[in-house]
Image (cartoon, grey):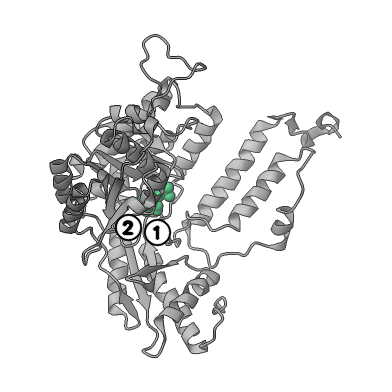
Amino acid sequence: MSTEQRAGDELLVEGLRLRSREAVLAHAEALILQAWRSFDQARPGQPAVDERVRAMLLEALPEEPSDPRGALDAAALVLDESVAQSRPRFFAYVGSSGLEIGVLGDALMASHDVNVAVAAGGAGLLERQVVGWVSDFVGFGARDGLLASGGMVSNLTALAAARERAAPGVRHLGVRDRRLTLVCSAEAHYSVHRAAEVLGIGSDNVRLVHVDAQHRIDVRACAQLLEADRVAGALAVAVVATAGTTLTGAVDDLASIADLCGDRGVWLHVDGAYGLPAAAAPSVRDLFAGLGRADSATVDAHKWMFVPKACSVLLMRDPLSLRAAFEHRESYMPLVDGEDAHPVDSTLEYSRPLRALKLWLAFRVHGAGALRAAIERNLGQARLLARLLEEHPRFELCHQPQLSTVCFRHRPSSKVNLEDHHRRLVPAIQLDGRIFLAGALTGGSSCLRACFVNFRTIDDDVRAIVEVVDEVGQRLAEAGSNSPAGPSAR
Ligand SMILES: Cc1ncc(COP(=O)(O)O)c(C=O)c1O
């Protein structure tokens, strides 16, 4: 049946156009509002994917059109049965929280579908403005850089520029028989290894420096390693300092590492994908001293600046270094008069949505002060959790939080094997569904890890971590069985 044969209200699509756009838009708006309302409170549990949804997700390729309102309802149902990081009790990994104005920014961005690969008028100017604003927000100093999909890509982009500076021409010649290295702490994010692999440096040439008691890179050991490698003929491409490690939120001593790099002419990249927004927060700002001497820095706005994924900002001291690494000419995109490069000449990606728009709106609508205050609130929540855990007889705090990440253990009794207990505890908590936590390893031992980067989280949500973990953990210990404890009877 063709769409033209349908009658009246049912005729909502015509070819690839929506017909009753107002009706469809109003429907989408209601669904978004419903989602936002449901994120306002903690929900009693995470619903399982029901049979109806499973069956729908096995259906064959639809040939015929259908009512867009029904399709949007189906999409919303699938999302409602998915683990959403926007919920206030999602504490795992480094989440994101789908800031409402950012959601609208994404919709608007996608409607215009600008590509910021080539000159795109106002969009290009807006991206530059956002890079400058983020630089001012965290105190980087220089106001150049670009937007990328995520921290993984921003780190790779910066390290491609660092590689070209360390070994000019390497992008064309390859590394050949030279030994290039990247230096970072043993607790740096694995995106450094990924970059080494992609850039032909090799992950075996990522030189891991051990960390001190605060999980920060041991600066003296870093200096010794750089020197030993130099004597052995290796070429250090960059030192990657972490400003907020994924595991514990540790901030490396940026000023001392900047001294090391400055003395040796080695590129300093700061991976602040998670933690760097905290450089804007008065209570921890001092931890980031030295940032203004880094060559490049990654900040993921989709983490601790609350906008929806994906929105990473790469800050660069010398924008020409990106051109050296990426500039490329093609016959189908010649430069026009007055242009000396396309935006894409400084990036890894070609098709580039205007990711900056959601962050631009976030700054304009809420102001930098509100973002700063939300970050401070998350920092306070990590301190609150640390205090509650220290006061509780059945918990062990693994480290004092430097930022908003807290690793801890549940210790139901002295008789329990803690490794077995935590192996069973993590899936049991996730099955219970009142909070979402993931497990981690510190010092080789299993623990639980909570990370606060959500503007919706309130202090009661923090208290719920202690209550739920203890309740589920005690139940597991009492059952003493090998199967995870089921959902609570509440
Ligand atoms: C310190 C750090 N760097 C890089 C990344 C990778 O970021 P993305 O997931 O945006 O690619 C993460 C992710 O959590 C991170 O914590």
Other-residue count near label 1 (Cα within 10 Å), few / some / many at <14 / 14–19 / ≥20: many
> Reading the chain from its start, which is encountered first: label 2 or label 1?
2
Question: Is 139 situated above or below 285?
Answer: above
Instruction: Quote the CA–CA distance across marks 2 and 1.
Output: 8 Å
> What amino acid is labelled 1 in the image?
Thr
Task: Confirm whether residue 455 shows in the render.
Answer: no
Mark carried by residue 378: 2
Amino acid carrying mark 2 in the image: Asn
Please report the residue visible at 28 percent of the width from the left and 78 percent of the height from the top.
Answer: 391
Which numbered dot is residue 241? none
Horizontal placement of 37 versus 398: left or right? right
**Which quadrant of the figure has residue 295?**
top left
Q: Is residue 488 depicted above or below 237 in this figure?
A: below
Residue behind label 2 places its C-beta within 8 angstroms of ligand 1:
no
Q: Residue at x 32, y 52 (%)?
A: 206
Judge by depth and name the residue closer to the eye, 480 or 339.
339
Specify the quadrant of the image occupied by residue 466: bottom left
Q: Secondary structure at mark 2?
A: helix
Which residue is denoted by mark 1 in the rendering? Answer: 457
Query: Is there a contact, CB below 8 Å, between mark 2 and mark 1?
Result: yes
